[in-house]
Image (cartoon, rainbow, N blue to C red):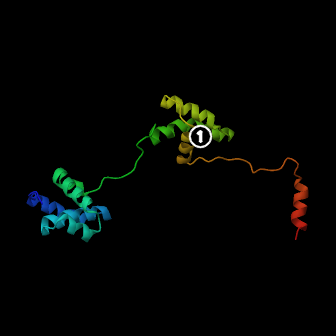
Amino acid sequence: MIVRPRQKTTESQNKAVEAALKTARTKEEYQRAQAVWLRVSLGMRAAEISKILGIHRASVWRIHSRFFKDGAKMLASDPHGGRHRENVSPSEEKSLLEPFVQRAERSGVISVAGIKQAYEKEVGRKVPKSTVYRMLERHGWRKLAPRPSHPDGDPAAQESFKKTSR
């Protein structure tokens, strides 16, 4: 079996790893720092580290590789998520909805078709209705509709039924 020579760490890297252990905010950050710390301070192999930390050996190799490639900054995690495929920013959405808010305050009823046209004009291409509905939901809008009632229903008969049904 051929074993590569182990990479040496500098004193500043060792201090950065120890600092990362103290400042880790998530479990993943702490495990990453532990994986590097166990290697640089105790000289453990990836198989031993993976058993101790409960992560796969390949993950330990990946952590070590990234540490020696990118340095101690890889120990802090980047924020996940975000609106990577957004058409317009939330502030632009708000300004797009502003005239519709004023119109809704006056008349009380707004159709989604008009908002969709304005949105498509802003974006410069066609978008599905679901995009507009999700935007409206993000900004606290909701669909108001009257409760359904039967066209032949008699409100007086319904009231008398409620009173005499028991």
Q: Is residue 14 left or right of residue 113?
A: left
Identify the residue at image location x=20%, y=64%: 46
Farthest-out residue, front: 1
Please name whichever residue, 12 or 51, is drawn nearer the observer in this view of the structure.
Answer: 51
Please name whichever residue, 93 or 150, is drawn nearer the observer in this view of the structure.
Answer: 150
Residue type marked 1: Val
Q: Is residue 15 left or right of residue 23?
A: left
Identify the residue at image location x=52%, y=47%: 138
Task: Give above or below for 99 relative to 51.
Answer: above
Q: Quadrant location of residue 133? A: top right
Q: Is residue 71 left or right of residue 122?
A: left
Helix, strand, or loop for circle 1? Answer: helix
Q: Position of residue 112 (x, y in %)?
A: 62, 37
Identify the residue at image location x=49%, y=28%: 124
Q: Position of residue 155 (x, y in %)?
A: 87, 54
Task: Give above or below for 150 relative to 103.
Answer: below
Identify the residue at image location x=29%, y=68%: 54
The residue where tag 1 is placed is 101
